[in-house]
Image (spheres, rainbow, N blue to C red):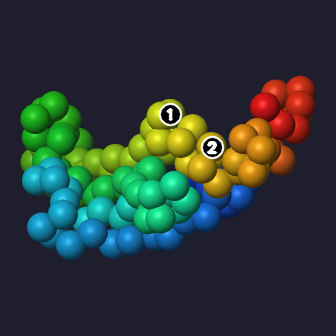
Amino acid sequence: MLSVAEEFYQNLEIPYKITLLSSGDMGKISAKTYDIEAWMAGQNAYREIVSCSNCLDYQARRLKVRFRDKTNEETQYLHTLNSTLVATSRILVSIMENFQTKDGHIVIPKILQKYMGKNTI
């Protein structure tokens, strides 16, 4: 999941970094979480745009999702993964802040230009 998200933002040419969160920064459902943080030039800081988590069996217990292992008759809760790829408002801000020209136009990332029909807005 993390590599898919990373490739997505590489294709958009948005400056980013990957951060492994400490347990104090994670929600209670996560055993391990990585964030992708995009550079927000107007804030002079990196801000979270993606969060990828291993939730172990926390979500499955609440949903009562189980499986039966062939070697064992007992059912077990499965482990789930959770990730955001695009938080629409955050990615729009990131594009605007990283691709805005001095005259106020926004250069559309190359990979999106064919869908927009133009290079700038």
Q: Which mark is residue 96?
A: 2
109 w.r.t. 11: above or below: above
Residue 15 placement, left or right of 108: left
Query: Mark 2 or 1, which is nearer the eye?
Result: 2
Rendering quarter of residue 60: top left
Q: Which mark is residue 88?
A: 1
Gap between marks 2 and 1 measured at Cα: 12 Å
Please give the name of the residue rendered at 43% of the width and 52% of the height, measured from the top-left corner: 50
117 w.r.t. 52: above or below: above
Question: Which amino acid type corresponds to the residue marked 2 in the rendered image?
Answer: Met
Quadrant position of the C terminus in the picture: top right
Judge the density around disc 1: few (<14), some (14-19), many (≥20) Cα neighbours within 10 Å: few
Residue 84 placement, left or right of 80: right
Residue 91: x %, y % from top left:
54, 42
Please give the name of the residue rendered at 62% of the width and 43% of the height, measured from the top-left corner: 96
Residue 9: x %, y % from top left:
62, 55
> Looking at the image, can residue 70 be seen?
no
Q: Nearer the viewer, residue 105 or 56?
A: 105
- Label 2, secondary structure: give it: helix
Please give the name of the residue rendered at 55% of the width and 59% of the height, measured from the top-left corner: 41
> Looking at the image, can residue 114 be seen?
yes
Residue 14: x %, y % from top left:
64, 58
